[in-house]
Amino acid sequence: MDQRTAVVLAAVIIVVAVIAVLGWFYSRRRRSQALRDRFGPEYDRVLRQEHNVRKAEGVLEFRAERRKKLPIRALDQAARDEFSRRWTDVQSKFVDDPKGAVGEADALIIEVMKARGYPMSDFDQRAADISVDHPLVVDHYRAAHTITLNHNRGKASTEDLRKAMVHYRALFDELLNEGHNATTAPKEAIG
């Protein structure tokens, strides 16, 4: 092989290597953007938690793969009507018994999740599972859960409990109405 052929071959190898590296970066960038689009604010939360883009994206991809294996289903109209009626009952109790109403709201959320097919492991796993399909309201679930824990420790005011109900309502609406013109905006009126 003459020197000119060797130089051309080296140049081709360098160009192919550069194209491969650029392709890899482009692929990573598309993957990151797809995860950002799918998980919204949950992407940023997990990134803050993991302190590393690769780890955070791995966590989110694991959640998505786990979710594919879960038998999540929409609720039929009768179940939606019954859960809706029960939510109205829980919400109406808030004025006279805010603490009891928040506890019942938490229990009702868990019932709806069970009926939808979500596994009932610990709270963190439930929130992770919910985040795949409902990334815009999972923070409502976390906030309500935190207030409920504070309430159990005697550290939640009535205003905190009202906020918990608003947060639970946002998740409740999303879970109940998925595929049925759901609204994810929390309703402020309690009582």
Image (cartoon, helix red, strand yellow):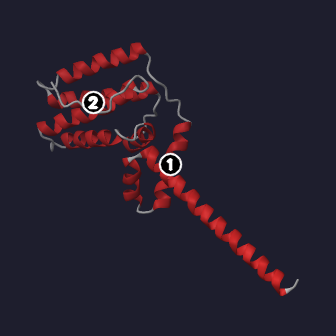
The circle drawn on residue 34 is 1
Amino acid type of the residue that numbered disc 2 sits on in the rendered structure? Arg
Q: Are marks 2 and 1 in contact (CB under 8 Å)?
A: no
**Most extreme residue toward the front, as rendered?**
4
Circle 2 packing at 10 Å, graded few (<14), some (14-19), many (20+), is many
* SS of the residue under disc 1: helix
- The residue that label 2 is drawn on is 169
Foreground of the two, 181 or 50: 181
Residue 187, image x and y in percent? 23, 30
Which percent across, then down, holds residue 67? 51, 38
Q: CA distance from mark 2 to mark 1?
A: 28 Å
In this picture, residue 8 sits left or right of residue 46: right
Figure quadrant of residue 11: bottom right
Q: Give the structural element (helix, strand or loop) at label 2.
A: helix
Rendered view: 24 above or below 168: below
Seen from this angle, which residue lies furthest top? 78
Q: Is residue 126 above or below residue 29?
A: above
State the residue at coordinates (41%, 57%). Answer: 47
State the residue in front, 169 or 148.
Answer: 169
114 lies left or right of 142: right
Q: Quadrant of the rendered structure where residue 8 is?
A: bottom right
Q: Decide if residue 190 is on the left or right side of residue 84.
A: left
Q: Residue at x 15, y 42 (%)?
A: 156
Q: Amino acid at mark 1?
A: Ala
For the point 15% across and 24% down, the residue is 191
Query: Quadrant location of the N terminus?
Result: bottom right
Q: For marks 2 and 1, give the one nearer the viewer.
A: 1
